Amino acid sequence: MNMNYQIPVKKLSNLVHTVSDASFLSDFINQSYYGVIWDRHIPVKIQDWLNKIDPKLIPSFRHIFHKNEVIKSINKIFENSLSKDTQINWLIQDITRLSKVFSNLMNVDYIRLRMEVVSTNSCRKFHIDAVKGRLICTYRGQGTQYGMSMDGNDPEKFKTTPTGSPILLRGTLWTDDNSRLILHRSPPIEGTGETRFVFVIDPIFDLENEI
Ligand SMILES: [Fe+2]
């Protein structure tokens, strides 16, 4: 008998929950959702700036920080950016805010922050990440695509996370359930001329293993 038929068919929106306020992001920990999206809108002027800025002016980085060092370190990274636009302060503050919210949620002192400027098909295949949990916020371009898979194959239907809305996803290291139902990918954009700004936060549970 094919075991897959024993999985009850559920609605995607029951598995990936949407909240309207950061205070409800605790649902990611307290409920059994596979993902939680904080549906929010970046101020129009800021989004406009993000959409138009020369991607070369947005620094790419990947680094582990203590949660209390994030604001100082991110300021330093952005200090070296050639952009002197005032909107960059919004971005620095938002990165700092998301880092604080997610490190508190996951109950860790250290987090890995990654900013990627993407114009190719990175992570195009549907997959699940080898982490406990991950926050992904796409500041420019199409957001993370996610769907339900009953058999490990690509989802037949998928949704796209709204630009600017962080999505929190469980990874393979979330031990208390079988979290392979929900798969995600970066949208395929190669050849479209689209550039995405993708910001990712991973909790660090064992700093020594990471160094
Ligand atoms: Fe991923």
Image: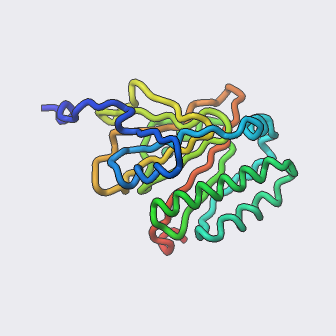
Asked if 51 appears above or below 25 in the picture, the reply is: above
Judge by depth and name the residue closer to the eye, 165 or 128.
165
Quadrant where the N terminus is found in the figure? top left
Q: Residue at x 69, y 44 (%)?
A: 117
Residue 182, given in percent of the width and then of the height, sits at 38, 39
Image quadrant assignment for residue 81:
bottom right
Q: In the figure, is residue 211 to the left or right of 72?
A: left
Asked if 193 appears above or below 202 in the picture, the reply is: above
Image quadrant assignment for residue 77:
bottom right
Q: In the figure, is residue 195 to the left or right of 203?
A: right
Judge by depth and name the residue closer to the eye, 91 or 56.
91
Residue 178, given in percent of the width and then of the height, sits at 28, 47
Residue 11, given in percent of the width and then of the height, sits at 33, 30
Judge by depth and name the residue closer to the eye, 150 or 88.
88
Q: In the figure, is residue 33 to the left or right of 138?
A: left
Q: In the figure, is residue 35 to the left or right of 38?
A: left
Quadrant where the C terminus is found in the figure? bottom right
Considering every residue shown, the one lying at the far left of the view is 1
Q: Which residue is drawn at 53% across and 49% down?
A: 22
Asked if 28 appears above or below 65 in the picture, the reply is: above
